[in-house]
Image (cartoon, rainbow, N blue to C red):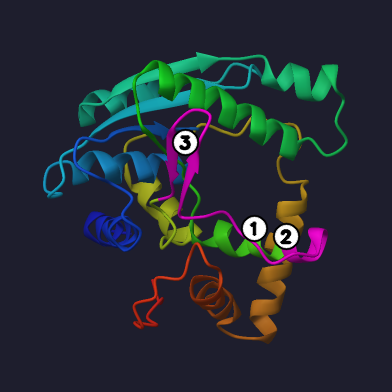
């Protein structure tokens, strides 16, 4: 995926949902995976030409599992002119050793988000950018439907009243393989996910289900994404465009 295409998708999402305003200071959550690296690069580059001036801070929440090497992320941040912070936590120990959670993803996600929000607040940021891509949108929608029996998905923009922080998701029009392709084109080492549950989660089940269904029903993922953007209140642009082929 070329830089221009990535930037066009990100800018479109930002414009469609008013994700960035003049003077924003945005904390970019950087796990070190493909999505967060692509998002960091795009938001850093967009500062050069986006009409509303903003600044960013890169933040990694370390789970305290293994010995991940974030030096390549630091190098990328230096090249992009972005201040980088690593927040050390014991989230992994709490989730997998202390609580011994059978389904650890929900608790881990809440704790990581909490640590990221606290760091963003400490750095005087008013927004937090999360690296959910287009596939994540579809998967989350189906997980909610199948496992919880409700029609919902995370919002492109949401507000945390307690922290006075907005969460934005600039990659919602970028497909997973596109983010991976772009991240691989950079001279930046992807940080391997140290989570013991990686690859053995409910999300992975849904990911495999979607792959199977797409073989039988071509373009199904795009149809689901279109339904989300047209029907869910937080996603409906109300502009009559009906063009969601990103």
Was residue 34 drawn as part of the magenta stretch in this picture?
Answer: no
Q: Which mark is residue 140?
A: 1
How far is the residue under mark 1 from the one under mark 3? 24 Å
Residue 241 sits in quarter? bottom left
| Vertical side of 199 occupied by 87: above or below | above
Residue 166 sits in quarter? top left
> What is the x, y in percent for residue 72?
38, 25
Was residue 166 drawn as part of the magenta stretch in this picture?
Answer: yes
Mark 3 sits on what residue? 190
Observer-side mark, 2 or 3, equals 2
Question: In this rendering, would 96 be left or right of 183?
Answer: right
| Vertical side of 167 occupied by 107: above or below | above
Residue farthest along the bottom direction in this orientation:
217
Which residue shows up at 73% across the image and 39% down it? 106
> Closer to the camera, 209 or 243?
243
Which residue shows up at 76% across the image and 18% down it? 94
Query: The magenta stretch spans which residues?
Result: 143-169
> Closer to the camera, 198 or 133?
133
Q: Earlier in the sequence, mark 2 or mark 3?
A: 2
Which residue shows up at 20% across the image and 46% down it? 46
Tag 2's secondary structure?
helix
> What is the x, y in percent for residue 172?
44, 58
How far is the residue under mark 2 from the one under mark 1? 6 Å
How far is the residue under mark 2 from the one under mark 3? 29 Å
Q: Cβ–Cβ below 8 Å for labels 2 and 1?
A: yes
Quarter of the picture containing the C terminus is bottom left
| Vertical side of 219 occupied by 234: above or below | above
Q: Which mark is residue 144?
A: 2
């Amino acid at each position: 995926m070329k830089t221009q295409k990535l930037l066009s998708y990100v800018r479109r999402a930002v414009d469609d949902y008013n994700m960035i305003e003049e003077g924003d200071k945005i904390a970019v959550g950087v796990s070190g995976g493909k999505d967060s690296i692509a998002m960091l690069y795009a938001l850093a580059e967009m500062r050069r030409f986006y009409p509303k001036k903003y600044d960013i801070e890169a933040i990694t929440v370390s789970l305290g599992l293994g010995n991940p090497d974030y030096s390549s992320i630091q190098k990328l941040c230096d090249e992009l002119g972005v201040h980088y912070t690593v927040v050390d936590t014991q989230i992994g120990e709490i989730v997998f050793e202390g609580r011994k959670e059978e389904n650890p993803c929900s608790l881990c996600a809440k704790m990581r988000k909490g640590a990221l929000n606290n760091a963003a607040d400490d750095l005087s940021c008013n927004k937090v950018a999360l690296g959910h891509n287009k596939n994540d949108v579809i998967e989350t929608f189906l997980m909610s439907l199948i496992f919880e029996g409700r029609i919902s998905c995370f919002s492109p923009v949401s507000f945390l009243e307690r922290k006075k922080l907005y969460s934005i998701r600039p990659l919602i029009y970028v497909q997973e393989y596109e983010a991976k392709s772009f991240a691989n084109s950079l001279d930046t080492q992807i940080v391997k996910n140290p989570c013991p549950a990686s690859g053995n989660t409910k999300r992975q089940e849904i990911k495999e289900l979607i792959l199977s269904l797409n073989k039988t029903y071509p373009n199904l993922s795009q149809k689901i994404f279109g339904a989300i953007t047209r029907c869910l209140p937080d996603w409906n642009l109300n502009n009559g465009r009906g063009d969601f082929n990103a």
